[in-house]
């Protein structure tokens, strides 16, 4: 798209918008949302992964010692659950909607329903509304049973 | 405010629990102030937690973790009995994006402490405390430590080690009916 401008070298290992756009388009074509996750360093910091399952995206977070919040239970850190759901919601916007700019989060609301045990957390997201400027995404996290969620989140993103 | 021995001993314990294990150690924040109902933290910038690969701004999830931890710590400081304080809900408003390569300061305050629920608010800023990156409100449940029976904790540990061979006590109690 911006081929006429000679691509400048990446400063500080940062990516350029055209690289992100390209990856997002490749990921949609290949049915592989993991490619978008790989762009974001925070996703590998917490260990978030994604794949397409029965036409929607399933996100999961394998258990990892660095995600523990309460070592005596042990339970996953509430902030990690929040961060994971916010990340999943952002990836959902990039993957499902026709958006290739990393969306700006405006507000984020999280209800903790059950403690996050020290095992894999799954999440799925639903875009409830897409306007010209605003997107509302809801995200649910569970461990053993989808009907017994451990947390639900609601997130507003501002589109450029 | 006079000297409070309990609080004075509590601070290093809380610092140790938060900074040296699990996600706190991975993030690398520091508790800079622990008072009754008021906690402050500092988070140095880290490349590993970037959320926007173009600008290098940290991911919102980091701010969630920081504010959740900070509010949670503030909630613990107002307890007057042995209890744990799981988060009920957390709501964050992002006012403006964080700037890369700058530390983030976080503060949290308990503004209401009732019999069962603790209400906190927190904010995260970089240069100017009056111009925060994010603001949050969080509520915490007070769950008496006595409610968590030792046998349940033990059973949970056994389950984790050997798989689910024993049932939780609630179900055992209901069986005779």
Image (cartoon, coloured by chain):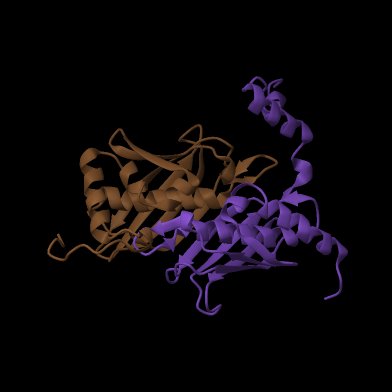
Chain colours: A brown, B purple
Closer to us: A23 or A94: A23
Q: Relative to B170, say whether A35 is above or below.
A: below
Say which residue appears at 14% left-offset and 60% top-offset: A3
Q: How many numbered marks appear?
A: 0
Say which residue appears at 55% left-offset and 35% top-offset: A119
Q: Position of residue B110 (x, y in %)?
A: 67, 67
Regarding residue B115, the answer to whether it shows in the image is no
| Image quarter (top left, top right, bottom left or bottom right) of the N terminus of chain B | bottom right
| Image quarter (top left, top right, bottom left or bottom right) of the C terminus of chain B | top right
Please indicate whether residue B148 sits to the left or right of residue B70 in the image: right
Q: Position of residue B61 (x, y in %)?
A: 48, 56
Please indicate whether residue A15 sits to the left or right of residue B76 in the image: left
Q: Relative to B119, say whether A32 is above or below.
A: above
Please indicate whether residue B148 sits to the left or right of residue B126 in the image: right
Q: Relative to A58, say whether B8 is above or below.
A: below
Q: Position of residue A149 (x, y in %)?
A: 50, 40
Closer to us: B90 or B62: B62
Q: Relative to A148, say whether B96 is above or below.
A: below
């Amino acid at each position: 798209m911006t081929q006429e401008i000679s691509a400048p070298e990446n400063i500080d290992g940062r990516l350029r918008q055209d690289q992100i756009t390209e990856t997002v388009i490749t990921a949609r074509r290949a049915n592989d949302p993991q490619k978008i996750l790989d762009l974001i360093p925070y996703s590998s910091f917490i260990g978030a992964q994604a794949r397409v399952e029965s036409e929607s995206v399933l996100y999961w977070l394998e258990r990892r010692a660095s995600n523990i919040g309460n070592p005596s239970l042990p339970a996953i850190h509430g902030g990690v659950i929040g961060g994971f759901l916010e990340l999943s919601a952002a990836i959902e916007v990039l993957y499902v909607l026709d958006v290739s700019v990393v969306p700006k989060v405006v507000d984020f609301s999280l209800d903790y329903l059950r403690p996050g045990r020290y095992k894999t957390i799954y999440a799925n997201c639903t875009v409830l509304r897409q306007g010209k400027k605003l997107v509302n995404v809801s995200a649910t996290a569970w461990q053993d049973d989808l009907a017994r969620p451990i947390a639900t989140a609601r997130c507003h993103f501002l589109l450029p | 405010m006079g000297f409070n021995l309990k609080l004075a001993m509590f601070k290093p314990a809380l610092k140790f629990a938060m900074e040296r294990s699990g996600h706190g150690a991975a993030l690398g924040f520091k508790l800079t102030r622990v008072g009754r109902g008021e906690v402050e933290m500092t988070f140095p910038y880290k490349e590993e937690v970037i959320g926007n690969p173009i600008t290098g701004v940290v991911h919102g999830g980091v701010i969630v973790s920081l504010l959740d931890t900070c509010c949670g710590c503030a909630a613990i400081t107002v307890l007057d009995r042995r209890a744990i304080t799981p988060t009920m809900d957390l709501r964050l408003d992002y006012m403006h994006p964080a700037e890369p390569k700058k530390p983030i300061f976080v503060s949290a305050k308990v503004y209401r402490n009732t019999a069962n629920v603790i209400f906190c608010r927190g904010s995260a800023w970089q240069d100017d405390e009056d111009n925060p990156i994010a603001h949050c409100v969080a509520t915490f449940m007070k769950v008496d430590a006595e409610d968590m029976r030792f046998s349940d904790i033990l059973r949970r540990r056994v389950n984790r080690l050997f798989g689910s061979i024993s049932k939780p006590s609630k179900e055992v109690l209901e069986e005779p009916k």
